[in-house]
Image (cartoon, helix red, strand yellow):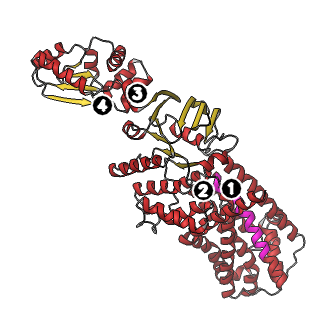
Amino acid sequence: MNDLAIAAQGLRKSYGDKVVLDGVDLAVPAGTIFSLLGPNGAGKTTAVKILSTLIGADGGEIRVGGHDPATDPQAVRAAIGVTGQFSAVDGLITGEENMLLMADLHHLPRGEGRRVAAELLERFDLVEAAKKPASTYSGGMKRRLDIAMTLVGGPRIIFLDEPTTGLDPRSRHTMWQIIRELVSDGVSVFLTTQYLDEADELADRIAVLHDGRIAAEGSAEELKRLIPGGHIRLRFNDPAAYRAAAAALGEATRHDEALALQIPSDGSQRELRAVLDWLDAAGVEADELTVHTPDLDDVFFALTDTGTDTATGADTATGTDTDTATGTDAATGTDTDKTTETAR
Amino acid sequence: MSSSLSLAVRDSSTMLRRNLLHARRYPSLTLNLLLTPVMLLLLFVYIFGGAMSAGAGRSAYLAYLVPGILLMTIGSTVIGTAVSVSTDMSEGIIARFRTMAIHRGSILVGHVVGSVLQSVMSVVLVGAVAVAIGFRSTDAGVLEWLAAFGLIVLFALALTWIAVGMGLVSPNAEAASNNAMPLILLPLLSSAFVPLHSMPGWFQPIARYQPFTPAIETLRGLLLGTHIGDNGWIAVAWCVGLAVLGYVWSTSVFDRDPK
């Protein structure tokens, strides 16, 4: 357990009757990015708070940097850096003063503190803003300052709790770049996010947290293969062509009103070609062809539930309506199974 | 042990620097809180002075009033402490501090020391206004001045720890300001403005033994040579008691898991 940057077994936490974490196992090898993926309220932030010694767990075995947060929180704190969901900068003082505050709290000698602060301000493009109060910073600048402050002590394990939530696309990409650079220095990153594309972009391993449990864990590729949300959508203008195509593509889900067919797919060239071949063989031409890759909704509906509610939800999420879903003769529950099989 | 003590001192002084930086960058809160004692001083001396002094003369009433106003200044300053602690706790930076390998208590100690320094400065400023309008200490030698200074620091320390506790349990700045309000209202029910013997008999014990009156009587005795009696010990006991109570309360609230 000690060669892992972060390890947790049977992590549990409740607030009153509400169980937030219900036996979570985590293993983050040193030098990798691990992403905990889940919707709002899944317990991601609670997990980060426990692992970063902010709150205690109700049960479970935890090691962060080889230390137990329950018995030796200061050793854990010395090894980690935390950038929380809500900006942890002091808005009343300037960016530079924030950095020097961190240097002082890490007990760096004055000269070294100034040097480290200046380097990080430079690296995160905050030199111009360094003399301005942090409260005047934009969202992206605040996050950059936040991470710069986290790096002052040279932590080997970094927690990033939804680092890009609320950022504009440009800032988001800047943040991704920053996170990638962190691991290139050999740091381990524990990242929470509600965006699959973010986890996909950054993480070596992803764990999906749902209802206080890990619903699935693996690389982005492994997870996507579990997810039935990926599909090819064909839309027709001519009802006759639509019916012909529907007959030719038996496994497609029909959307009669929209004259659209939805065929499960992992988005690979091979599957796309197979669909095109079927269409050619049937002699029909689609007016519009789009490839949909799975999104977070798909992950959740696929991994976390088998009930009708969820199937309906998944349909809504992918832009279909329930009428057409019941139009398929397959029950909605088995729909999921079938797609998963195809994907495999 | 010595290394953990030096860690505590080092981190506390870092936190103190942070709080003084806040106070220097945003002096308006502190200055606003000074307005109340200064206005009351001017109001009672120049507007109500004639009636209050019952013919003894304005300068005699000014002399009577100033010790109470000075201690009221501390009550007023620590309302600012409650507000800034409460505001600070809602900031993400406190969560960051909690996940750093620093001395835990330094966060509160930084607030407390900063607040005591601010209180002393406020007392000096209000005292300067009093001197400007004619207040003179008639009886204080070096020892009395030192004792008066010590009393002010001790009183500020006691009220500050209580105010820090109030700030910690308040969900926001408004609540903190309301919760700390008694600290500026209590002087009105003390011997600050009128002598105890002018109050209704049933009320006199309350006024006599609440924290402000013994401290005011002691300060009055030190500056003006009035009889101190057992007020000195009662004042010190109140200060030590409130400081310990506030310290235990604040640290136990602060050590709880944050929400």
Where is residue B216 shown, x and y percent of the image? 78, 72
Where is residue A228 shown, x and y percent of the image? 34, 23
Same-chain status of marks 1 and 4: no
Specify the amino acid type for callout 1: His
Please name the residue that numbered disc 2 is placed on. B86
- Quarter of the image containing the N terminus of chain B? bottom right
Q: CA distance from mark 4 to mark 2?
A: 47 Å
Mark 4–mark 3 CB contact (< 8 Å): no
Q: Main secondary structure of the magenta part?
A: helix
Q: Chain of mark 2?
A: B
Q: Quadrant of residue B259?
A: top right
Q: Nearer the viewer, residue B221 or B207?
A: B221
**Nearer the N terminus, badge 4 or badge 3?**
3
| Region of the chain picked out in magenta, as a range | B149-168
Q: In the structure shown, which secondary structural element does the residue marked by tag 2 occupy?
A: helix
Please name the residue that numbered disc 4 is placed on. A293
**Nearer the N terminus, badge 1 or badge 2?**
2
* Residue lying furthest top: A329
Please name the residue that numbered disc 1 is placed on. B103
Is B198 rendered above or below residue A284?
below
Q: Chain of mark 3?
A: A
Is B20 rendered above or below residue A180?
below
